[in-house]
Amino acid sequence: MNFATRFWIAVTLPGLVAAVPALAADPTAVARTHSEEFARACAAGDIAGVMALYEDDAIAVWPGEGEEATGKPAIEKLVARLCSGKGNGPVLKSVEGRSLGKSHVLSYGHWEMVSATPGGARTLIRTTEVLKETAGKWRYVLDHASIGAPPPPPGVTPGGAAPGSAVPGSAAPGTAPGSALPSGAPPAGAVPGSAAPVGAPPSEAAPSGPPPVH
């Protein structure tokens, strides 16, 4: 290896190494540790402990209607209802992490909630979260949770009606649009073959033949 080649390697290699984006050491370990901290604090009713896992400007989107919040004060209201310590908290079932760079991790997990009512109905929850490392501490910047919709009954198209059933707002088969009568049926009270109701006064007949000459 001549001097020129060694010089090129010495000058270029550090720049190439620096250009490769650094990744989080073990994204799944980061995701699991963070999720387990959330589960423990929530089960204990430790609201402050849960909120310590969020960035100040974090966003939370949870399954319930209207359960969306931006910023820790708003998110704390959601957390206070979920992590009251009076019922069963969410239980982590599985979690996986993907690195989004040195300071960000995508966390994808499955949780289970068991209601405190008789029978203990189980609800499966999916989470997709983004964690950010700041000064050695990982926190949520996005906390999204969802519940899968149950499958439709057999023979029902998702978002549609069962085969053979009437579509809301439409006429039944064989009826005129906007009417409950079959197409071509006379109105109520009409003599068959006539459009006039029974008992209606006959209209004046037009005189036959040419008009009279005055």
Image (tube, rainbow, N blue to C red):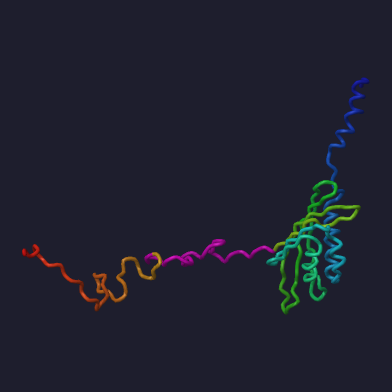
| Magenta run includes residue 165 | yes
Question: Total number of numbered labels?
Answer: 0
Q: Residue furthest left?
A: 213
Classify residue 154 as left or right of residue 114. Answer: left
Q: Residue furthest front?
A: 214
Q: Which is more toward the observer, 125 or 212?
A: 212
Q: Quadrant of the C terminus?
A: bottom left
Q: Position of residue 183 (x, y in %)?
A: 34, 66
Q: Position of residue 123 (x, y in %)?
A: 71, 68
Q: Which is more toward the observer, 138 or 197?
A: 197
Classify residue 100 as left or right of residue 160. Answer: right
Q: Quadrant of the N terminus?
A: top right
Displayed quadrant of residue 83: bottom right
Displayed quadrant of residue 43: bottom right
Magenta region, mostly helix, strand or loop?
A: loop
| Magenta run includes residue 141 | no
Q: Position of residue 129 (x, y in %)?
A: 77, 56
Quick check: 197 above or below 21?
below
What's the magenta region? 147-176
Report the residue at 20% width, 74% height from top. Answer: 202
Quick check: 161 above or below 26?
below
Q: Position of residue 176 (x, y in %)?
A: 37, 65
Quick check: 39 above or below 86?
above
Classify residue 111 as left or right of residue 29. Answer: left
Report the residue at 48% width, 64% height from top. Answer: 163
Report the residue at 31% width, 75% height from top. Answer: 188
Report the residue at 90% width, 28% height from top. Answer: 11
